[in-house]
Image (spheres, helix red, strand yellow):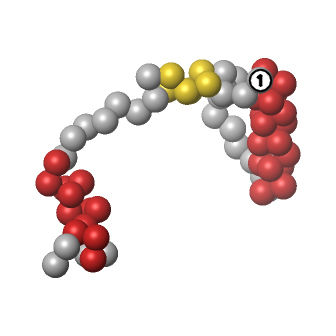
């Protein structure tokens, strides 16, 4: 069977190589502390404001 025919081939290849890849770090996310919300609507309003701040700064840059 060819690898292209095997549905789980990608997982098998990843398991065989087992390389550790460094994740990029985000820059431009405003700092915030632990938040507690009494409702989902309150949390969504907070997230919306956070996303507005990020957009105003020009977005998030990913660096290695």
Question: For residue 49, which quarter of the picture?
Answer: top right
Residue at 55% x, 27% y: name it.
62
Q: Position of residue 53 (x, y in %)?
A: 81, 27
Question: For residue 48, which quarter of the picture?
Answer: top right
Image side of residue 8 versus residue 45, left or right: left
Q: Nearer the viewer, residue 56 or 8?
A: 8
Q: What is the secondary structure assignment of the residue under circle 1?
A: loop
Q: Position of residue 39 (x, y in %)?
A: 79, 56
Question: For residue 30, which quarter of the picture?
Answer: top right
Residue 9 appears in view: yes
> 58 above or below 45?
above
Q: Position of residue 29 (x, y in %)?
A: 66, 26
> 18 above or below 32?
below
> 9 above or below 28?
below
Badge 1: residue crowd in 10 Å (few <14, some 14–19, many ≥20): few
Q: Nearer the viewer, residue 6 or 34?
A: 6
Image side of residue 53 versus residue 24, left or right: right
Q: Nearer the viewer, residue 42 or 22?
A: 22
* Residue matched to label 1: 58
Image side of residue 47 versus residue 22, left or right: right
Residue at 22% x, 69% y: name it.
3
Image side of residue 64 versus residue 41, left or right: left
Q: Quadrant of the C terminus?
A: top left
Residue at 77% x, 23% y: name it.
58
Q: Position of residue 26 (x, y in %)?
A: 56, 27
Residue 31 appears in view: no
Q: Quadrant of the N terminus?
A: bottom left
Residue at 41% x, 33% y: name it.
23
Q: How many marks?
A: 1
């Amino acid at each position: 069977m060819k690898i292209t025919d095997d549905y789980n081939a990608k997982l098998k290849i990843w398991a065989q190589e087992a390389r550790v890849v460094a994740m990029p770090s985000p820059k431009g996310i405003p700092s915030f502390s632990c938040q507690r919300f009494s409702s989902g609507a309150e949390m969504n309003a907070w997230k919306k404001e956070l996303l507005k701040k990020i957009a105003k700064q020009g977005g998030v840059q990913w660096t290695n």
